[in-house]
Image (cartoon, helix red, strand yellow):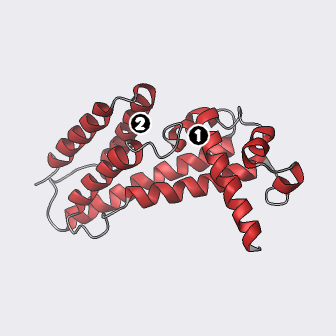
Amino acid sequence: MSAKGELTRRNIIEKSLQLFSVKGYFNTSISDILQTTGLTKGGLYCHFKSKEEVWYAVYEDAATVWRTMVFKDVRSIGDPLKRIERTIENVLLEYLGREVFDGGCFFVNMLVELSGQSDTMGRHILKGFVGFSKLFQSWLGEAERVGLLKPDLNYRAISDFIIIALNGAATLYMSTREGNILHQANDQLRFFIGQLRE
């Protein structure tokens, strides 16, 4: 693809991400995408075959942004429980608190909208949440191996609870824009992680 073609593709993805995040997938029309990008239908379809194909490219772009923010300064932390705490803090205060996407959390918005509407797209988003839970589970296993955890803990239940709490905080924050929700969630989850220590 030429440099100009790549710039056009990036423009479509970036502008569509904001549209989908604010208006939702189903309320965003091809005309909306054309208007915000300044392209013709031919120009758009030269890069993407359908609105759904645009969405998948947008999802990957949003996931890249999310990973960059959520895992910032995390991998170098030796203590796996502190790694979990930092990741939680990054989700709440860096990703959600900085309002990276105009409509709030792209993934929560899309999961709510697409559930029952598009099983394929909904499962694609859910797969990301499951993968995030599995990462926490692996870090908890690492913490157990180095003797940091109380015995007989259910890593999956703990990790799923963290994901549920993060998504609950995201939803409440997006509906109120009250920053104290994110700080309270961070403090409570930090306390929760602390209770797991041996």
* Image coords of residue 128 (percent x, y): 51, 52
Q: In the rendered image of this protein, does residue 19 appear above or below residue 136?
A: above
The relative height of residue 11 versus residue 78 in the rendered view (above or below) is above
Dot 2 surroundings within 10 Å: few (below 14), some, or many (20 or more)?
many
Q: Is residue 117 left or right of residue 148?
A: right
Label 1 sits on a secondary structure element that is: helix
Disc 2 or 1, which lies upstream in sequence? 1
CA–CA distance between discs 2 and 1?
14 Å
For disc 2, the marked residue is 170
Residue at x 77%, y 46% (from the top left corner): 51
Closer to us: mark 2 or mark 1?
A: 1
Mark 1 burial class by Cα count in 10 Å: few <14, some 14-19, many 20+: many
The residue nearer to you, when weighing 145 against 108, is 108
Q: Which mark is residue 9?
A: none
- Residue found farthest to the right: 42
In the image, what residue occupies the spot 21% across and 45% down?
Answer: 190
Q: Give residue 45's position: percent from left, percent from top.
A: 85, 55
Eyeballing the image, is 30 above or below 130?
A: above
Between 56 and 1, the one nearer to me in the picture: 1
Quick check: marks 2 and 1 in contact, CB under 8 Å?
no
Seen from the viewer's position, the closer of residues 6 and 189 is 6
Amino acid at circle 1: Ser
Residue at the limit of the structure toward the front, as seen here: 38
Q: Amino acid at mark 2?
A: Ala
**Which quarter of the rendering shows the N terminus?**
bottom right
Q: Which numbered dot is residue 21?
A: 1
Residue lying furthest top: 176
